[in-house]
Image (cartoon, rainbow, N blue to C red):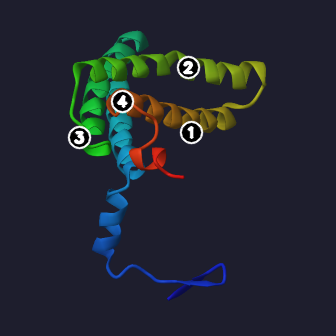
Amino acid sequence: MTFLAGQAVPLPRSLAGSLRTLFDREHFRYLCSGGLCALLNNVVFIGGASLGYSYLALTLVSALVAGTIGYGLHLRYSFREQGRWRGYVQFLGGTALGIPLTVALLALQVQLLGWPMWIASPITTVVMVLYNYASARLAIVGRLIGRRMLHRR
């Protein structure tokens, strides 16, 4: 037993059971898939830049490559849904909208508010993770909240 805020909290029986519970959570699966997409995005940008490609070209390539792989990962793993062309197009649209949104958030914080980049970048990252989750869930699942949340009273 472990004590948390004065209450006894039983520890999980096994590490495997704990991991299974963790991987059953949609938010955790989303972060894992998103992390892989972020890694792929960095590989495209760093590798492409070392080969002399422009940022604009790399942005387009990354949006298509990481966006397509991201859609597949989120579809099958994060949200465990069936695919639709309409959802794929919506997902890529949300990804494309995220690019100017990121630039606008950084400009607002750095240029207008005068915040240093070391503050603005992490704030923007958190906002964009939330935006990307909502955008992906809407495109793939068709709603922001789960069915259980809709039927709670």
Looking at the image, which residue is at 32% across and 57% down?
24
Is residue 47 or residue 39 the one in the foreground? Answer: 39
Label pair 3/1, CB-CB below 8 angstroms: no
Label 4 element class: helix
Amino acid type at mark 2: Leu
Q: Which residue in the structure is indicated by mark 1?
A: 126
For marks 3 and 1, give the CA distance.
Answer: 24 Å
Q: What residue is disc 4 on?
A: 41
In the picture, measured across the screen, residue 122 lies left or right of residue 114, that is left
Measured as percent of width and height from the top left, residue 13 is found at: 34, 82
For the residue carrying disc 2, how many other residues have a C-alpha within 10 Å: few (<14), some (14-19), or many (20+)?
A: some
- Pointers 1 and 2 in contact (C-beta within 8 Å): no
Label 4 crowd (10 A; few <14 / some 14-19 / many >=20)? many
- Regarding mark 1 in the picture, which secondary structure is present there? helix
Circle 3 residue = 76
Return the disc, 4 or 2, that comes first in the chain's sequence. Answer: 4
The residue beneath circle 2 is: 101
Q: Secondary structure at mark 3?
A: helix
Q: Quadrant of residue 116?
A: top right
